[in-house]
Amino acid sequence: MALLLFDIGNTNIKLGLYRAESGLSSYVLPTPRSSTADQLGLDLAAILVREGVEPEALEAVLAVSVVPPVNPMLRQACNRFLGKTPLFVPEDVPVPLENRYERPEQVGADRLVAAYAARRCSSTHCLVSVDFGTATTFDVVRGSSYLGGLICPGVLSSARALAQDTAKLPQIDLEPASLKLTIGRSTVESLNQGLLFGFASMVEGILDRLEDHLGEPVTVVATGGFAAQLARVCPAIANVRPELLLEGLRLVYEESARARHARAKDREQTIIPQRRTT
């Protein structure tokens, strides 16, 4: 089985090619706001050639998107260059979680998919999926129910806000020189320490308050660009899954395929064979 998976974000498209025999290969493309469907299709075709996969070998193409204008471009590119129509989650393929949002349609599809993937990779009753993306999102799952979450500033957006209109602020990398907080003795070090330990403390504080609110401990599954760096200084982060959302798309598709197979089998069993009359 081969699946082509898309996580369409505001800045980048993260693309995953999953094969049962070799697992997941991932690529990052810029979100094509001013490009064309042909350019995107050529990029996809080139990736498949590099991976040695023929378009006909793809069982399905799945996408989760928070940038609606890109969706028709992806459809055109996949139809023309791959001969496949992409399925969008949750519009075409539902996420198998009970959505308890006051207005379920307002939950970002990426948050739901990541929450489902976190649910599948954790055996605890209550868990929190934390995504360090453009925003830092906390999504709470209890049992098989998505309860909702919190949206906080993102690491990179915070760094950019600090640098706005300030030409002397340098680029940062958030690589911890030490696992303990130190007092910065340069602008770079001060920024690194402030952002790294500031966000680690934010995560720890929010998780403490969530546990008080829920009345039970939670397990944390983290993803996003800075998850690995923050996990080094934030013991509350139990599990880092860089490809959590792409894994979630695969799991959602597989669950949907199992459900379709079960329904087809049930229909076959309800058919009563008719006797021939002579």
Image: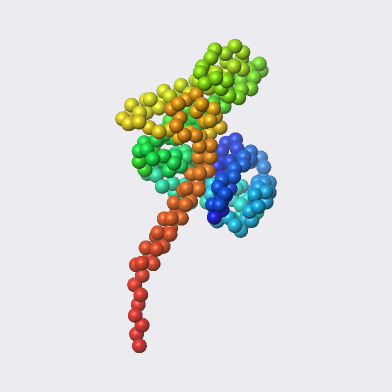
**Residue 231 on image: x %, y %:** 50, 28
- Horizontally, residue 235 falls left or right of residue 59, namely left
**Residue 244 on image: x %, y %:** 50, 40
**Residue 67 on image: x %, y %:** 55, 40
Looking at the image, is 184 positioned above or below residue 109? above
Residue furthest left in the image: 215
Q: Is residue 105 visible?
A: no
Which residue occupies 51% across, 26% down? 232
| Quadrant of image for the C terminus | bottom left
**Residue 91 on image: x %, y %:** 47, 48
| Quadrant of image for the N terminus | bottom right
Report the colour scheme. Answer: rainbow
Looking at the image, is 240 positioned above or below residue 174? below
Q: Is residue 114 visible?
A: yes
Judging depth in this view, the residue of 71 and 11 nearest the camera is 11
Which residue occupies 59% across, 11% down? 185
Say which quarter of the image contains residue 150: top left
Which residue occupies 48% across, 51% down? 253
